[in-house]
Image: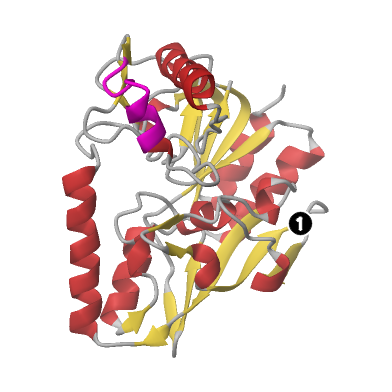
Amino acid sequence: MDLSQIEEMCRENGSFCEFNHILAPNTSMKIGGPCDAFVKVTNEKALLEVVKLCRSENIPHFILGKGSNLLISGKGLRGCVIALSSEEPNITVNGGEITAWAGATLHSVCLAALNNSLTGLEFAYGIPGSLGGALFMNAGAYGGEIKDVVRSCRYIDEKGELREMSAEDMQLSYRSSVFSCRNYVITSVTLELTTGDSAAIKARMEELMQRRRDKQPLEFPSCGSTFKRPEGYFAAALIEECGLKGYTVGGAQVSSKHSGFVINRGGATFEDVMAVVDEVKRVVLEKKGVQLECEMLILK
């Protein structure tokens, strides 16, 4: 695999490039081995250039946002990991519309909404991901989802062309979208919000953030909710009813604070986390007859 062209391109467009980069610090679970090449891009043009080069040279590549819903094996990833920088979020506000670079954090977009007295995105405050990643999986919390507020996005299609897609064509459903099953790369997202009272928006954001602090194990690395919500049930309740709260393998544990979270208590390996996940799935199926499905993306 010849990665010299990637290094040369990054040198030309000013993007960061590093070989044999360890991915653990780039994920909220703090687990993950090396990738052959790690490229950090700050804008659509640079992203398009790297994606097109990887495709033309048949270099495996993975688009990385904040890594907040991602479990990577200790073996790491072959090819190129293209990280969307959050350092330059490129957020613009036009009336009730907010458009932002896919790498922008949900935190920064929520603050932009607050600063412009726009309501509808409060549910996302505290979700530790990027805007592009949130659209990719139709992230949600506290009764809200990205599908409720997204208007359109720009993306790179399978032919390497920049296109725009309306919300109606995104096939947004519970933790899923057209982007999770097609070789598309989101470059920017436009949200449609409504004018509200800034004090009420701020109060709602602070209320939800406090609920997260009170109920979720934010003090430990995790991927957030480990399992999707099974129809008619709550994963955390099923896990707790099966006596698995606190179940531990190595450095990985079903959180004793919220059993819907598998956390890294320190030094957890990919194998530790998967052992906990597999045991939880096995016991819940055996005792409750419910097949749990992981919400996090697992890359072996």
> Which color scheme does this rendered protein use?
secondary structure
Residue at 37% in and 67% down: 109
The percent position of residue 296, horizontal first and vertical second, equals 50, 36
The percent position of residue 253, horizontal first and vertical second, equals 31, 20
Foreground residue among 257 and 55: 257
| Residue highlighted by disc 1 | 157
Residue at 24% in and 31% down: 220
Foreground residue among 2 and 111: 111
From the image, which quarter does the N terminus lie in? top right
Q: Which residue lies furthest to the top in this view?
A: 250
Residue at 36% in and 60% down: 142
| Residue stretch rendered in magenta on the structure | 237-247
The percent position of residue 226, horizontal first and vertical second, equals 43, 34
Magenta residue check for 299: no
* The quarter of the displayed image where residue 272 is located: top left
- The relative height of residue 55 versus residue 125 in the rendered view (above or below) is above
Residue type marked 1: Asp
* The quarter of the displayed image where residue 270 is located: top left
